[in-house]
Image (cartoon, rainbow, N blue to C red):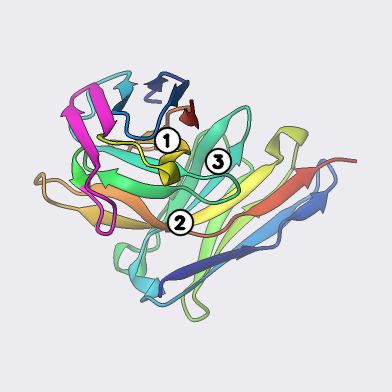
Amino acid sequence: DIQMTQSPSSLSASVGDRVNITCRASRNIGRFLNWYQQKLGTAPNVLIYAASNLRSAVPSRFSGSGSGTDFTLTISSLQPEDFATYYCQQSYTTPYTFGLGTKVEIK
Amino acid sequence: DVQLVESGGGLVQPGRSLRLSCTGSGFMFGDYVMNWFRQTPTMGLEWLGFIRNKAYGGAIDLAPSVEDRFSISRDDSKNVAYLQLSSLRADDTAVYYCARTSYDTSTGYHTAYFDFWGQGTPVTVSS
């Protein structure tokens, strides 16, 4: 299985801060990488697919970059509604695998 | 609007079986690959498997961790996908989700991602 390692596992930030979350794959996955946001008690919601494509209706403050083994999710200016847990997920091959998540908390 | 609703979860004894359902609406259910996942605080999000649409023969791909105990089926006439769980163990306790696969081809490849999810159904395995 391809292992997905996210860092940090949690972070505290203030509204307006720029936030970067990184995800590393255990082997080359090209751009087969998606990012999800999950709020407490709800299902994950895809933000970014194919490494850098913003899903429609997702705010432009979210962006994704990277290819191969190293990827980044950036929130350019953190908003109150962005406090949640973020997951990366590879769709290069089955079994599809997720990172363990990054919890973004209010400072 | 696209909607997925899981049902069938609950409390079940170890060793028993359970069938979860995922009912879709607001889209052409039969055209889509349907997936099952589970989530626990300790193990995080785990993809369990998918069932392809009829155009691809309804083929099934299951995660090795569950392929000997779980199976997936679908009934497109009812817009339902099923996850059959058997020989349940305490560590199968989780919230189970279904989700639809969409594909992006902007990179020249078909990148799968999960664009709509159900609300989840909890399964507790305990005596």
- Mark 2 lies on a secondary structure that is strand
Chain letter for mark 3:
B
| Residue at the (18%, 40%) spot, across then down | A52
Please give the residue where the numbered disc 3 appears in the rendered image.
Answer: B67
Give the spatial CA distance, label 3 vs label 1.
Answer: 28 Å
Please give the residue where the numbered disc 1 appears in the rendered image.
Answer: A86
As rendered, which of A86 and B41 lies closer to the eye?
A: A86
- The spot of residue B1 in percent (x, y) is 40, 75
Which comes sooner in the sequence, label 2 or label 3?
Answer: 3
Chain letter for mark 2:
B
Q: Nearer the viewer, mark 3 or mark 1?
A: 1
Direction bottom: furthest residue: B77
| Residue at the (21%, 42%) spot, across then down | A50
Bounds of the magenta segment: A54-75
Please give the residue where the numbered disc 2 appears in the rendered image.
Answer: B99
Q: Amino acid at mark 1?
A: Tyr
- Mark 1 lies on a secondary structure that is strand
- Residues under numbered marks 2 and 3 in contact, where contact means CB atoms less than 8 Å apart: no
